[in-house]
């Protein structure tokens, strides 16, 4: 009995016997797909937004469209702004949900050839674990679609179509998100792996190396031009010492995916060993290292590793998972359309609650009040870097540092670190960078020391946050 | 193993010199000596904190490191110190050697064993010191190695567990690891073989063995309670492992990648073999991810698995042909003896020619200045480990010290409020009638005392300041500024 038949028998034993395997197998698989899609859409709708990121994306999207300012991730910001203007927060939630669902669909499709029809669904579910901590509106799910598409192309395409496809997807990825800088890394590892496995540089390897050249060329095809690579390396957190100023450790940034996915990949890899292809081994190793160095790349680990691990399972135990029979395409298509309709209906029905919006966020409220209190432009420092994302969306405020790490230099990051950790010379850093206001937790040592400093006064405090203002002379 | 001995020799020099010449990486050794001396003097173990602390006298305490503390007291100085600290270093060396031998026993090649032993050695650095947990390392590796033996020898693991429980509470891992090995062996064999039954028996016996210490069942209960203790959030080495940790990045991570990518289990017919190792590895990985202090034990356990995986999967690491029987003594005896001899000679040369620890990290100058001051002091240290050096000193009572575990949550909360300047920190300081603060220079509390007033500096240098309550300035000769 094939794997699919085996799985179907487990799901619907009496019906399978009576009605045959194919229809109920499809029904079972599509029901699970529908459930997964609905859960993802609903999750986006009911969980609070990543408010600072969303505010910044909307502001930057506005600048793209009205001021023609193109920073990193300009395309995703513009898309978010366009959809936000047209259909509000619900539309952005639907966009985020659709991005994740599309990514998982691509992961599943990539696993199909390795693992067959039923088990490939399992790859999608495993990859979904990587999203456990980033299912928030504004968390930037659009870029990962390109990662899944790129890996699918690498698996399926050959020759000129591989080169063209990889180049185009890489260009899209680089314009959507700074993580596009990973594109040459992924194709490079595949090229190395395939060359190693072939034992020599054979003619068919040319396409992979040309695809690597195309992906590298894509790094130049953004508005930042030649400046994209160094900026994207910073923005994608590929820079030592960044964890001094922003949280990167997976237990902080992706605590659920950390155990659910990272541990699962390690244990499954140890139990199964990755399939004999060197490219797979290199990709999984890179995924693990990236995830551990920056927890926000957990989705990439899932996208990379899930099809490989599920495929390895089939490779290691071929007798248990035979090649699947051809599927009933018409049934699949009908159920696919139904699934999407149900998922989108739910997403539209469950609008994000009003309290999830920006005004409910105390750091935003404090910064907003401060922004309108004077006509003068002022400089602000936030002890939590992400809070200063709001400053991008507020008039006359300029942050020492926000989540656009690529706009900072070493001296700025040191100042941020010294002030937030109240290191020796932190007051001089505040003066040197002409900081007018400091937003911090009430319970921070920084707050206690500013209270004791006669040059600073509490401008306002709400919830657990307090904003200090430098005394004007 | 021939290359691995050379690697171990290099680490052995480092461990020996580090232990003998650089005795303390935290203040634990001081209170452990005090505890050991107390046990030797009274012949009894303390069961609660005493007057050495003013925040929690009478609170129950389980001094799990009692045997280590007695040895620390006996080897406090002179040759006793060299024997004691050298013995701790030998524990680290033995753990590394046992891990390498385990790799060889599982069929790893010399090259793979050497590489993975090097990774494991680097992994030990982060937690290495004259510490009780170092004594537990060879006991852990030895326990796991014994489980793999056939026949009655495996039962020696129970004795190892009993010894382990007298040195460190990590002995609570023993029954769990034996149970996982038994389950894995059962899955591998597909039926409850004699070995599976033996492993379950060892697991059960280990459960009893870890109670063979002065605390009985309270030791495993204490260790389990420790898993969820909130005070761990305030201790660096209990924090989850991060990429920034050198010993993780250059030791545990490579081993983790090797086992995750190449696999530990091997196919045997239609079945996977090695679930025994996979389950143990999964547990150690969980521990690794949970706390930075577990990098060392992960590295020791994962190294043999990684070496075997490299040998089986990558041609360059494949086993070399066995040497001619006439020359087997060279890798088995000559190289280990030569390598370890060189290592000991090198360590001795370094000790004779090298210098002792100059870079103080325990606020010793400030604590010495405090010891020279008359009267009684209620002391808080911005690094609680420093106050471990004041435990048992006449006239000194500490807020919290390196014993850490027994202090109740409310004491920890108060301590964090003061040292991290949480709202109301001055009130908490006053409520506890603290009159002495040993602070790192320019740490938040030091800055706050400078700004707040009501305290004066009794000693300062480039790294530390000693604050005393009251605005009275000390005599000029008392206020020394060691900062150049």
Image: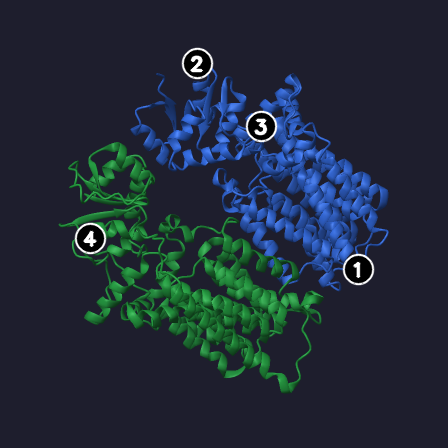
Chain colours: A blue, B green
Percent across and percent down for residue B412 are: 30, 47
Residue A181, picture quadrant: top right
On what subunit does the disc labeled 4 rest?
Answer: B
Helix, strand or loop under label 4: helix
Query: In the image as oriented, which residue stretches furthest toward the bottom?
Result: B326
On what subunit does the disc labeled 3 rest?
Answer: A
- Labels 4, 3: front one: 4
Residue A238, placed above or below residue A378: below
Give a yes or no on whether discs 1 and 2 share a subunit. Answer: yes
Query: In the image as oriented, which residue stretches furthest toward the left?
Result: B375
Give a yes or no on whether discs 4 and 3 share a subunit. Answer: no
Marks 4 and 1: CB-CB under 8 Å? no
Marks 2 and 4: CB-CB under 8 Å? no
The residue to which callout 3 is attached is: A351
Helix, strand or loop under label 2: loop
Give a yes or no on whether discs 1 and 3 share a subunit. Answer: yes
Task: Name the residue located 55 percent from the left edge and 25 percent from the top edge.
Answer: A55
Query: In the image as oriented, which residue stretches furthest toward the front?
Result: B353
Helix, strand or loop under label 3: loop
The residue to which callout 2 is attached is: A374
Task: Name the residue located 41 percent from the left edge and 33 percent from the top edge.
Answer: A419
The residue to which callout 4 is attached is: B371
Residue A199: numbered disc:
1
Give a yes or no on whether discs 2 and 4 share a subunit. Answer: no
- Labels 3, 2: front one: 2
On what subunit does the disc labeled 2 rest?
Answer: A
| Sequence-first disc among 1 and 2 | 1
Q: Residues within 10 Å of mark 1 (few under 14, many from 20)?
A: few
Task: Name the residue located 69 percent from the left edge and 65 percent from the top edge.
Answer: B313
Percent across and percent down for residue B218 are: 32, 65
């Amino acid at each position: 009995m094939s794997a699919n038949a085996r799985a179907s028998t487990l799901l619907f034993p009496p019906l399978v016997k009576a009605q045959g395997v194919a229809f109920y197998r499809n029904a079972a698989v599509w029901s699970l797909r529908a459930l997964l899609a609905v859960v993802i859409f609903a999750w986006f709708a009911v969980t609070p937004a990543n408010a600072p990121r969303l505010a910044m994306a909307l502001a930057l999207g506005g600048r793209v469209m009205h001021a023609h300012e193109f920073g990193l991730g300009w395309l995703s910001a513009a898309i978010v702004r366009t959809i936000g203007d047209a259909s509000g927060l619900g539309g952005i939630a639907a966009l985020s949900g659709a991005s994740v669902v599309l990514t998982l669909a691509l992961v599943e499709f990539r696993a199909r050839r390795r693992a067959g029809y039923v088990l490939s669904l399992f790859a999608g579910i495993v990859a979904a674990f990587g999203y456990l901590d980033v299912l928030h509106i504004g968390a930037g799910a659009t870029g990962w679609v390109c990662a899944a598409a790129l890996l699918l192309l690498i698996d399926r395409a050959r020759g000129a179509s591989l080169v063209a496809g990889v180049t185009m997807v890489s260009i899209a990825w680089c314009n959507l998100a700074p993580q596009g800088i990973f594109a040459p890394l992924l194709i490079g590892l595949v090229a190395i792996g395939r060359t190693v496995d072939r034992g020599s540089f054979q003619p068919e390897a040319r396409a992979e190396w040309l695809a690597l050249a195309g992906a590298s060329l894509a790094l130049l095809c953004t508005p930042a031009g030649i400046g994209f690579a160094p900026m994207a390396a910073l923005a994608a957190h590929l820079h030592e010492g960044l964890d001094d100023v922003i949280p990167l450790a997976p237990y902080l940034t992706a605590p659920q995916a950390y155990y659910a996915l990272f541990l699962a990949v390690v244990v499954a890899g140890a139990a199964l060993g990755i399939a004999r292809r060197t490219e797979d081994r290199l990709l999984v190793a890179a995924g693990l290292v990236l995830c551990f160095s920056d927890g926000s790349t957990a989705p990439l680990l899932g996208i990379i590793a899930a099809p490989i691990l599920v495929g390895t399972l089939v490779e290691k135990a071929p007798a248990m998972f035979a090649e699947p029979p051809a599927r009933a395409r018409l049934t699949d298509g009908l159920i696919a359309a139904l699934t999407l309709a149900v998922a989108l209906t739910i997403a539209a029905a469950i609008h994000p609650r009003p309290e999830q919006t920006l005004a409910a966020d105390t750091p935003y409220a404090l910064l907003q009040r401060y922004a309108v209190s004077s006509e003068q432009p002022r400089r602000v420092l936030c002890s939590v870097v992400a809070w200063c994302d709001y400053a991008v969306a507020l008039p006359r405020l300029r942050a020492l540092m926000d989540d656009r790490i690529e706009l900072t230099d070493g001296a700025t990051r040191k100042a941020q670190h010294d002030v937030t950790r109240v290191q020796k010379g932190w007051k001089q850093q505040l003066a040197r960078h002409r900081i007018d206001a400091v937003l911090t937790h009430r319970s921070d040592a920084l707050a206690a020391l500013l209270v004791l400093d006669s040059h600073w006064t509490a401008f306002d405090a709400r919830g657990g946050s307090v904003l200090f203002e430098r005394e004007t002379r | 193993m021939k290359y691995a001995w050379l690697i171990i020799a290099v680490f052995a020099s480092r461990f020996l010199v580090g232990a003998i010449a650089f005795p303390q990486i935290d203040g634990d050794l001081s209170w452990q000596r005090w505890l050991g001396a107390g046990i030797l003097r009274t012949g009894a173990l303390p069961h609660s904190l005493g007057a050495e602390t003013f925040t929690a006298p009478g609170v129950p305490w389980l001094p799990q490191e009692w045997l280590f503390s007695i040895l620390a007291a006996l080897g406090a100085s002179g040759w006793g110190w060299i024997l004691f600290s050298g013995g701790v270093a030998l524990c680290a060396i033995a753990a590394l050697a046992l891990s390498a031998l385990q790799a060889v026993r599982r069929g790893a090649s010399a090259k793979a064993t050497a590489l993975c032993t090097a990774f494991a050695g680097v992994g030990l650095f982060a937690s290495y010191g004259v510490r009780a947990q170092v004594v537990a390392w060879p006991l852990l590796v030895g326990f796991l190695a014994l489980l793999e033996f056939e026949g009655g020898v495996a039962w020696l693991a129970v004795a190892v567990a009993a010894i382990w429980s007298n040195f460190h509470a990590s002995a609570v891992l023993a029954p769990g690891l034996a149970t996982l090995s038994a389950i894995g062996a059962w899955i591998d064999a597909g039926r409850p073989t004699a070995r599976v039954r033996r492993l379950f028996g060892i697991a059960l016996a280990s459960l009893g063995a870890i109670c063979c210490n002065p605390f009985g069942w309270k030791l495993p209960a204490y260790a389990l309670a420790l898993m969820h203790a909130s005070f761990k959030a305030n201790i660096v080495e209990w924090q989850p492992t991060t990429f920034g940790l050198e010993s993780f990045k250059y030791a545990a991570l490579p081993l983790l990648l090797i086992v995750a990518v190449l696999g530990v289990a091997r196919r045997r017919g239609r079945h996977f073999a090695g679930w025994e190792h996979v389950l143990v590895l999964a547990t150690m990985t969980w521990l690794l991810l949970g706390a930075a202090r577990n990098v060392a034990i992960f590295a020791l356990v994962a190294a043999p698995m990684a070496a075997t995986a490299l040998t089986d999967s990558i041609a360059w690491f494949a086993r070399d042909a066995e040497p001619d029987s006439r020359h087997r003594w060279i890798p088995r005896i000559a190289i280990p003896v030569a390598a370890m001899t060189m290592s000991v000679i090198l360590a001795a040369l370094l000790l004779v020619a090298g210098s002792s620890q100059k870079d103080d990290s325990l606020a010793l100058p400030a604590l010495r200045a405090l010891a020279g001051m008359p009267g009684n002091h209620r002391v808080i240290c911005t690094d609680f480990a420093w106050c471990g050096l004041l435990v048992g000193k006449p006239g000194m009572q500490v807020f919290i010290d390196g014993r850490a575990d027994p202090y109740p949550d409310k004491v920890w909360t108060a301590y964090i409020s003061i040292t991290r300047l949480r709202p109301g920190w001055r009130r908490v300081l006053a409520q506890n009638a603290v009159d002495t603060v040993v602070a790192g220079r320019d740490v938040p509390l030091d800055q706050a005392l400078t700004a707040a007033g009501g305290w004066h500096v009794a000693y300062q240098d480039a790294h530390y300041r000693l604050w005393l309550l009251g605005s009275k300035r000390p005599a000029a000769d008392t206020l020394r500024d060691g900062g150049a």
